[in-house]
Image (spheres, rainbow, N blue to C red):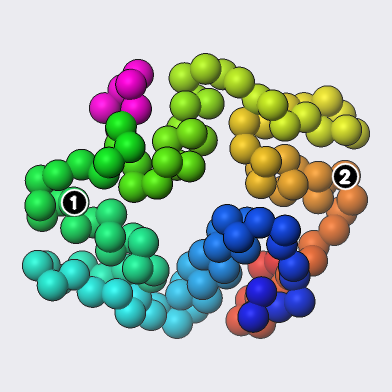
């Protein structure tokens, strides 16, 4: 990560980390640099704007759930969503046997056991 010293093995994990970092910083700055050319809405990240544009085109994102009416811009988003329908929770905590559908939620949960708070915001006490 260019904002901190944290390293990730997968690009999706780094992208998620940066998203939450930028989102939290925007709470302090109010900055939303990605503006819609069709209306007055602005977004913290380009991905939010991309999703919003479907409102104006009337289209739906390309990856549609076969169980409900939700659609996703990325195939990975659909894959994660499908866990809601199947109830599958393949990521199991080695400390308490609690299980999670999403790996990043398990990683966040593990911090409860380690009491680790690796990142602290420079604007507030959130970590």
**Label 2 vs label 1, nearer the camera:** 1
Q: Examine the image and state in which quarter residue 16 appears.
A: bottom right
Q: Say if residue 24 shows up in the picture.
A: no
Residue beneath disc 1: 54
The correct choice, above or below, for 84 with respect to 10 in the image is above
In front of the other: 63 or 26: 63
Numbered circle sitting on residue 73: none
Considering the image in quadrants, where does the N terminus appear? Answer: bottom right
Q: Say if residue 74 shows up in the picture.
A: yes
Disc count in the image? 2
Mark 1 and mark 2 in contact (Cβ < 8 Å)? no
The correct choice, above or below, for 30 with respect to 53 in the image is below
Q: In the structure shown, which secondary structural element does the residue marked by tag 2 occupy? A: helix
Residue in the picture at 62% in, 31% down: 101
Residue beneath disc 2: 113
Q: In the structure shown, which secondary structural element does the residue marked by tag 1 occupy? A: helix
* Residue 37, position as x, y percentages in the image: 13, 72
Q: Examine the image and state in which quarter residue 127 appears.
A: bottom right
Mark 1 is surrounded, within 10 Å at the Cα level, by few (under 14), some (14 to 19) or many (20 or more) other residues, namely: few
In front of the other: 58 or 28: 58
Specify which label sits upstream in the sequence, 2 or 1.
1
Residue in the picture at 10% in, 52% down: 57
Estimate the spatial distance between the alpha carbons at disc 2 and disc 1, rounded to whole Å: 41 Å
Q: Is residue 66 magenta?
A: yes
Range shown magenta: 65-70
């Amino acid at each position: 990560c260019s904002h901190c010293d944290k390293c990730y093995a997968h690009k999706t994990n780094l992208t998620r980390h940066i998203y939450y970092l930028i989102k939290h910083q925007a709470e302090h700055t109010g900055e939303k640099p990605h503006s819609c050319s069709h209306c007055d809405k602005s977004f913290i990240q380009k991905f939010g704007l991309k999703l919003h544009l479907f409102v104006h085109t009337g289209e739906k994102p390309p990856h549609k759930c076969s169980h409900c009416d939700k659609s996703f811009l990325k195939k990975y988003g659909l894959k994660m969503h499908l866990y809601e329908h199947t109830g599958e929770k393949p990521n199991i905590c080695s400390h308490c046997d609690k299980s999670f559908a999403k790996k990043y939620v398990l990683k966040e949960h593990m911090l409860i056991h380690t009491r680790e708070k690796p990142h602290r915001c420079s604007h507030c006490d959130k970590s």
